[in-house]
Amino acid sequence: MTEVAGGGTRHDSHIHLFEHGFRSDTEAGQELATYEGLRAEHGIGRAVVVGFEGNPAHVGNNAYITRLAANHDWIVPLAFVDLAAVTANPTHARELRDAGAAGWSAYVQQPGAGAAWAELPDQVWDDLDGGSVLSLNIDPGELAALTPRLASLQHTTVLLSHLGLPARGPGSSVEERLAPVVAAARAVPRLLVKSSGEYATAGPDEQAPFPSAKPYLQHLREQLGAERLVWGSDYVPMLNRQTFASQVDLASYGVFDEAELRLVEGENLARVLPHG
């Protein structure tokens, strides 16, 4: 087992587990078995499993990850919430929670999706404020439209995936691209940003630790503080660009001191996860 850079226990804020693999091309349960080996090797405690059913191949993922959680106490399953489903059935999020989800994941990336989520009935947002976790893969432009609704949450913690997806943000500078993320974090006290998916900021020839990602990490640390960041692996998709060990090595970016690494790699997330 490798030592956690800052000491303590590492927790993973973002993984995916699909019964037959991310590309639907593996034996049942192989992704889970591989990750369990990586957990042991790298000293990972709990992991937030981000549900996704956004294409036909992945329908049924919510049921799969909640079944896994019943037998693996390290799994924190977040059920995928589809905008169309929750629009048609305002109790959809509550029903997913009642079925065993520890919280929810939502992908808010189509133009106008942020405003559409914000305009959902109060009943939906009351259910989402049930003292759990809401993971958002959200474009910065859509985040601006949704921030006032997120600011109304009193009990649920919001996790913004992949540095807030700055490569999809407005403008060209780090500051411009992260402006909606910083503004949201300042408006929403229970919002944390995942240090995950750094590869999405990188050029095709870059290797981890990705030089293009470092300024984004630095800016988030400077503007929000290490206490608002949580490490995530983005297993399995990240394996297309880097090794798991290189994603674990957050210290290699040279952005955080040892005390800050303890916060980002584990302590911050441990404080907000529901009890396993």
Image (spheres, rainbow, N blue to C red):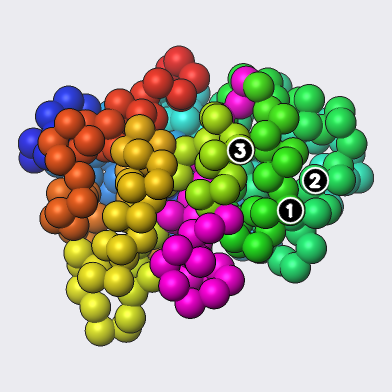
| Badge number at residue 118 | 2
Q: Quadrant of the N terminus?
A: top left
Residue kind at label 3, given as amino acid type? Ala
Q: Which residues are magenta?
A: 155-180
Residue 7: x and y in percent read 12, 29
Foreground: disc 1 or disc 2: 1
| Badge number at residue 145 | 1
Q: Nearer the viewer, residue 246 or 77?
A: 246
* Residue 99 is covered by the magenta coloring: no
* Image side of residue 134 versus residue 195, left or right: right
Q: What residue is pinned by disc 3?
A: 187
Q: Quarter of the image holding residue 74?
A: top left
* Image side of residue 132 versus residue 10, left or right: right
Residue kind at label 2, given as amino acid type? Ala
Residue 69's place in the image compared with 195, above or below, is: above
Mark 1 element type = helix
* Image side of residue 89 versus residue 227, left or right: right
Foreground: disc 3 or disc 1: 3
- The mark that comes first in sequence, 3 or 2, is 2
